[in-house]
Image (cartoon, grey):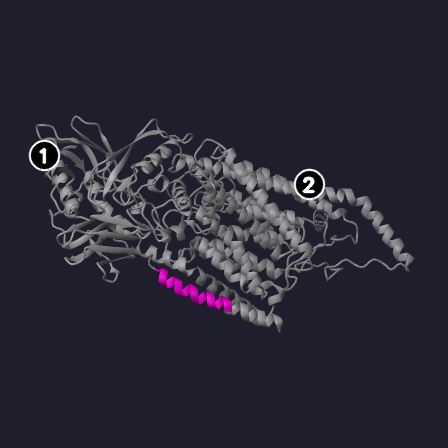
Amino acid sequence: MPPVAETVLDEVEAEGGEDAGPGPRTGAPARRGARAAGAAALLTAVLFCLATALSRSHPFGPVTRNVVDLGQQYLPYHAYWRSFLRGETHGDAFLNWNSGFGANFLGDVGTYLSSPVDLLVVFFPADRIELALYVVTAVKITAAGAAMAALLLRLRPGPWPVVAALGTAYALSGWTFNFGSTVPMWLDGLVAFPLLCLVGEWARTGRRPVLGPLVVALAWIANFYTAYMATLGAAVVLAVRLLTAEETATARRRLAGALRAARSVLVGVGLAAPLVAVVFLGTKTADPTPEVTFAPAAWTDVLARFLPATASTASPALFIGTPALLLALTLPFNRAVAPRVRAALTAAVVLVTLSLQWEPTHLLWHAGASPNGVPYRQAFVLCGLLLIAAWFSVAGGVPRPAALLAGGALLGGLAWAARGSVDIDRWTFPASGAAALLALIAALLALAAARREPPGAVGGNHRDSTGTTPEDPTGTAPEAPSGGDRRGLTAAARQDSVRTALKAPARLLPLLAVLLLVAAQAGEAAVTGKRIEEQQRAEVAWSPRTGPWHEAAAREVARADAWPRHRTDPGEVPGGNDVLLVGGQGADYYSSLTSETTSRTLVSLGFGAYAKGRHPVTLDNPVTDALFSIGTRMRSEPAEPVRQDAPPRATVTATTVPVPPLVTVRPSARPAGPSGDSAFARQERLLGASVYELPAPRRTGRALVAHCPAGSEVWFWAPEYRGTATLAGQRPVRFDGKPPAVSAAMGALGTVPASGEVRIALAPEGRARLPREPVGCLVRARLDAAVDRLTATGATRVRTTGHTVTAALPPGSTGVAVLAVPRISGWSCAAGDADLRPARAYEGLVAVPLDGRADTIHCSFRPPGLRLGGAVGAAALLALAATGVLHRRRSRG
């Protein structure tokens, strides 16, 4: 926009330079900054909600937003977080008793829930958790827009309405719609990038040495994964500023600024260490996902992602709006910007773009490990850099026609090169063309307004890279002539008359230009958000909205819950992570930190798993129910097919059976039982009894034939099998094995007929991969006897607190006490009055050796890394205090 727009819309004088000095920003600049941040926040919130409404998604429509991990992870975790904050859970900040038969909750807090914005869920009722998560998402996106607007004005003064539009463009980039809005924890990185750039500005100019590390700590606590990427991006911006700003024109000042920034980052990360260390060590013990080899996206697809309404997980989401992109592309040709600024910013954008496609820098962006799923998670940094470039090109006035033509030519070439990409949507070019047309009209209006400015008018000169005008190098208006100079008064009067004559069009044209710019950005953002949501629902996995099914299951779980006497498993509820949504203490657990011990132990016993092992799911099997003390199990009968546009309904029933207590006693530290590596054999070894008949089935064509005791229950186990298996005379049972992503759970096929013949018809989808012992016939009488024995010799009383278990045992117990909890890192146990020591393992479960003298055991869980992180955090706190004291002394001096 031309400077007159700033005069008209601000009605205050512009700031005199890029940096007014080390003092606080007050007066007009501060008001302009607050106005820009507020406008960006408001516009961002309105447009995000509008995009949701246009796609008919909840809460502004009937259709679910719960695609992929939004429904499988983030919604359940926020539901549990709400219950935890209200004191309604059995566990505490260290341990989650509901998931995976006992999981490291502090690690999950640091991964998914540590953002201050996530605390908002406590203000919503339990049946409005989807609305709560939407509000959390919207607040984070809104904060990102406000933070970027504040940063842009700190980097360089200019018209605040344009700043608001560019802040909104950053918050509602393609990255936000395609990735961030469905992975809310990543949105904290979107907020962190402009805030960390502000920290870099403070460090460069020697300001706020205490606040800077606190901002860094907040960013890393909120989500250290994307905060790491944001820190790298902020380092790039700081490097550009150190090389180009007048305040750091000498090598000594540049070095001092860089050292101050490094101190802020080191102290800030140190303050976040108590949480970051827990998450970091949790990833070391997590179930490993298959290694990923980075394959760069085709450049055609990369260029396409700069355009609106494109969606893909295989290429970087780089849409920032056609007007904003056009402004960024004019920077290299905008001679009103200092050459060193143009060169440095252009080089930064180009190098960061190339770094997305080169494997060594790809690994650098992702902390050394190529991620599964979305490989371009750092793309929000490039979006931010592009908007900084756009702002530097427009802050001093709309680029001249030559720069606009050159930028337009680049934009046209980009669109032409991207025309063959598979990511191009039918809305892409119409939306981009309409936005480009509005932006062109806005530019013409702004240029016309600049020509209408009278000579010597305030703001009438085009500002150079320092923010001053050639006639007024100080950035201030000339004083009025003295009363004794009549010629001065006459000249001033004539000038006032010219200003008055041109006042109306000078006010109207810039306002229209701003409105058209905002309309272009807003329209494209709304269309992009709408189309991306629609494409995601059509192409990726989704979960239904929460509703009557979940509410019925939650009521039944609350009624039947008998923890710690025995567990209650809610069974299968649509959406995954069932126990976090409805309560209970089942196996369901989906986290990036799912322990390898938990995953391997459960899958080896016949449980199913998704997400390459990181999402074990419930198993409705009487033997594993006895092993894990699941006394009450919920079973659901859906009333109708699950749909995207309506919450599901179902009838939920609860069944309670006798099971051993949570702590049992085994005669030996080594399990005795049948040999073999099948899930049936492993169950029997852990149970300490033979309860299955394990026939050697003959395979005849697409059928398995075997013999088992009449009346026994036929179970089929084939974790890699995909298709159906049907016992003669029974209904087909579906199995969904798809290695390495999905392990199929053991399933019941029916009862063995009086003849004892077992004939299982297979209908595989592709090659039928079966283990050596795929069939087991469960004899209930043997299982009942094993349950009675374990109950008689097991704990007489079990008490649990947030992260501890205490059990009273029959006097003289020997062998090993087994706690029905996976032996993940962090468990320590002792018998009697002995000191706590790292727990032993018994077939993957927590174990405590017994010598016959102790009649109690005590186990406690502490997240690994907590002690180390606490020590680092304490040292960082001391360093911060020392920094504050030194800064105060220098200020007084």
Q: Residues within 10 Å of mark 2 (few under 14, many from 20)?
A: some
| Label 1 sits on residue | 708
Residue 378 numbered mark, or none: none
Amino acid type, label 2:
Leu
Q: Position of residue 276 (x, y in %)?
A: 40, 58
- Per the image, label 1 sits on a secondary structure element best described as loop
281 left or right of 784 in image? right
Q: Position of residue 644 (x, y in %)?
A: 41, 31
Residue 512 numbered mark, or none: 2
Cα distance between the residues tagged 2 and 1:
83 Å
- Per the image, label 2 sits on a secondary structure element best described as helix
Q: Earlier in the sequence, mark 2 or mark 1?
A: 2
Amino acid type, label 1:
Cys
Closer to us: 379 or 328: 379
Stretch in magenta: 865-881
Q: Position of residue 381 (x, y in %)?
A: 50, 53
